[in-house]
Image (cartoon, helix red, strand yellow):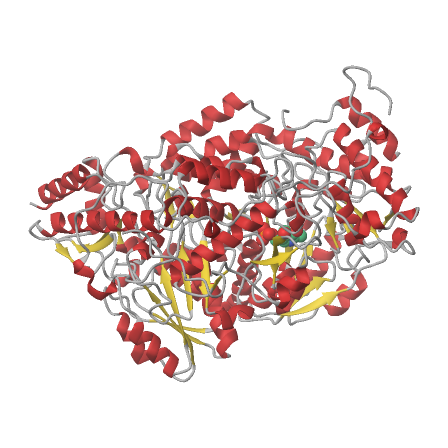
Amino acid sequence: MTMQTVGRPTRPEDVQPLDSGFASLTGGRGLLQDEALIFERDGWGKTGVDLPAVDAAADDLGDLVRTSPIGLPGLSEPEAMRHYVRLSQKNHAIDLALYPLGSCTMKHNPRLNEKMARLAGFADLHPMAPLPTIQGALTLMDRLSHWLKTLTGMPAVALSPKAGAHGELCGLLAIRAAHEAKGDPRRRVLVPTSAHGTNPATAAFVGYSVTEIAQTDDGRVDLADLEAKLGPDVAAIMVTNPNTCGLFERDIIEIARLTHAAGAYFYCDGANFNAIVGRVRPGDLGVDAMHINLHKTFSTPHGGGGPGAGPVVLSEALAPFAPAPWVVHGPEGLTLVEETVEEAAQAFGRMSAFHGQMGMFVRAYAYMRSHGADGLRQVAEDAVLNANYIKARLSGVMTPAFPEGPCMHEALFDDSWLEGTGVTTLDFAKAMIDEGFHPMTMYFPLVVHGAMLIEPTETESKQELDRFCEALIALATAAKAGDVDRFKGAPYLAPMRRLDETLAARKPRLTWKPEPGVAPAPLAAE
Amino acid sequence: MRYLPLTPDDRAQMLGVIGAATIDDLFADVPAAARKSEPFDLPHHAGELEVERELSALAGLNRAAGAGPFFCGAGAYRHHVPATVDHIIQRSEFLTSYTPYQPEIAQGTLQVLFEFQTQVAALTGLDVANASMYDGSTACAEAVMMARRVTRRKRAVLSGGLHPHYAATTQTIAHAEGMDIVRQTVAIDAEAAVIEAIDSETACVVVQTPNVFGVATDVTAIAEAAHAAGALLIVVTTEAVSYGLLKSPGEMGADIAVAEGQSIGNALNFGGPYIGLFTCKEKLVRQMPGRLCGETVDADGRRGFVLTLSTREQHIRRDKATSNICTNSGLCALAFTVHLSLLGETGLRQLAAINHAKAQRLAKALAAIPGVEVLTKRYFNEIAIRLPGNATQMVEALLEDGIVAGVPFSRLDPAAGLDDVLLCAATETTLDEDIDAFAQALSRRIG
Ligand SMILES: Cc1ncc(COP(=O)(O)O)c(C=O)c1O
């Protein structure tokens, strides 16, 4: 090993291989703690809050009062802090490194947005507080609506859906209501084979049967197949654009025309809006309804699985069927239409209690204002540039699923380049973890064998992209050189080795239970 | 533009590597007619200071619940959340991570979910809980559709005490799926009436306790009647703190329990994001909607956690999935779990007792006002009162006295003919002085 020049980063070739024989005495792993569950910490009876004593009795409730123990342990405040901070350290996060999950748009989450959502006027605001006390909230919803409508070129928006899939549900319910209003209930929804699972699941939820549309060799909707399958019983098509292969549907305007000519509506899955925001308006493409994942395009954090928000923009034809509630301008300021009576006679109903994900509206609006119309356009350009850069740099070692022409915001590879290596897409993904990167989306879309879908987003620097590409090139080279153990056993360096998902499903253990033979949790100290 | 790392130089170099002359070349697949060459008619980018100024001004137009005496509930409750909770949920590793599909680098989120599922199952007295739904109302709708899958029957009976928004959400969503939803006449304390409506076609009955008028009910007899007819009992709760004082749905025979979990760990947020709790008996687990976290081992034999039983879910089963849900309320679940771990059983029971005591004080103070009738007899932390006149007008009048008196029932359900009914909640955040001020102002306005 050669000595480093002072002040220079360590080069990979200077690092000694791991001494695999080493084991700590206690099972410890450096500072990464093995953390017991809260149920395994003798916290029965403990509490980490100081509450005043109560003198009143609950005798008015008679035998409605709980008499058996609940079974909840407690932690003092320092223990709770440490427990959850330790757990946090076992997670990857966008704040740590690139998070190239295709279709998920894992971009930077500005902390200004968090700060704004926590202003008392938003966070400590009750959804049913009297109208004069919520004018700021309604104004924000109104401004957010204006931005969403302007960016999409659509005349109306329903804010209340709580995530993308909930937005799909909202859009299809509006479509169903529109057909029913014409006395022409239809039965089928057409969905391309490359669609996200929520599309067919939502269509089935709304009572439609799903027919798949084929894809062309260049990764787009097959127009001939679409035409053949459109008919008087088709209520809608659901097409993602840019699609889940990361490609723009070149024939989108023709797709819309054919759909409308058959009396059906065009639902667009807007999960990939980040690729075109500020440059293309879905309204100009003939779309009738589209959800926008605020937790993708507009940077609200994913939070380890949620919450999101999925407002749906609607065309003139569908707008009358939008669900309650919505904001209207009245003589005494803004007001809410909350019930599907009178003014809202055609509304199809209600998506959930209250008015939608206000906390996400604040964050998304802060993000839009920060970027502005000019910045959002740049977002799309940089997102597309970054994806094409990755595609260009990796095409020498991996096989792009659709080599011809540019991709949009994500680069899709198949696994043909792994043929004969004994390494699968899954193995390759797990080996990426050892190199310090979160894997890309794997095995989606289903139309591409062993799919690897890489979405860098616009918030990555060129340096980070280069590091990422170099890591993937090194791995690809190792796979082709027969270094199979590196992949089959991966990950080696993560907080855990590969987890047995089959075992988990075969013998589901979904809650903690005391060891057999050990007395159940003692009753909390009264 | 502070969120964009690429420099003009980077962009030029990268275009070179790609082999494109301009950025427009990368958008070549967009039909020419749909390309916008100019930024849209919206303001241009703004600095933190400007954005903060605009949003603070908007927030300032609202009256925060904490600004004075405040009694709104009706499915969203103002509770104190320990500072630790907000710190934890703002940790980068929790806030900015995705759904834990790569379990080796997501054990933090996964272990939290396992703790969350165990806590929720314990609270509701049922066997298994999922990793959260969007909110209580959508959890309710999903429970009804699950009952259809389990029983292969189409009819659902909703009690008249179910929160009108929950009823409307369920009607909207479950109806679309082809269910026949029977909503009973709105009534303050008539949950037992659902028994009459159960027949051999009934998939489930849905009963809320405490109900939208605050009435707590022992649903044991309803469970027996439902089971005798081969139907499931779904118990809905909108105030999760009540589990600390009242018998759990499981103890009373529920097959599925759903709840709004906002009260634990989560702010009011003007209605969202919230967190739907979803639990059921073990034998029904394969019909459950949503994600589930389960225990397993890694290649070295160490315990770890993964998302499991995903053959129920949309990404595997597509149009045969039990639900279309994907993104859920993960971070709200974390807040719930951290807050509940801090409370522990001791703290939760105490918190529940305080809430109930505050409501007793509120009920007593309001009952003493001539012309006011307290309609809710057995309550947790919320009561319905009947006023001598229109409740919406009274709320507006009391606002002039600086008091937010509660939620007029007619705002939730204008068609119910209960224009004189006001829902009033009290929690540990309610001061005794607030109650006194409310009672005095109300008595002055009536008198
Ligand atoms: C293409 C596509 N459609 C729909 C969805 C569903 O969105 P959500 O998870 O917000 O429900 C996703 C995200 O997971 C997606 O990638």
Residue B432 image-quadrant placement: top left
Q: Residue B341: x and y, percent?
A: 42, 46
Query: Residue furthest toward the front?
Result: A25
Report whether residue A264 is seen.
no
Query: Residue furthest toward the top?
Result: A6
- B407, A33: nearer the viewer: A33
- A368, A424: nearer the viewer: A424
Q: Residue A482: x and y, percent?
A: 91, 49
Report whether residue B368 is seen.
yes
Q: Residue B241: x and y, percent?
A: 33, 52
Identify which residue is drawn at 54% across, 48% down: A306
Query: Residue furthest toward the bottom?
Result: B200
- On the rendered image, what quadrant is the N terminus of chain A found in? top right
Q: Residue A14: x and y, percent?
A: 84, 27
Tell me if A295 is positioned left or right of A63 in this view: right
Tell me if B431 is positioned left or right of B86 in this view: left
Tell me if B239 is positioned left or right of B375 in this view: right
- Up the image or down, A434 lies above or below A177; here it is above
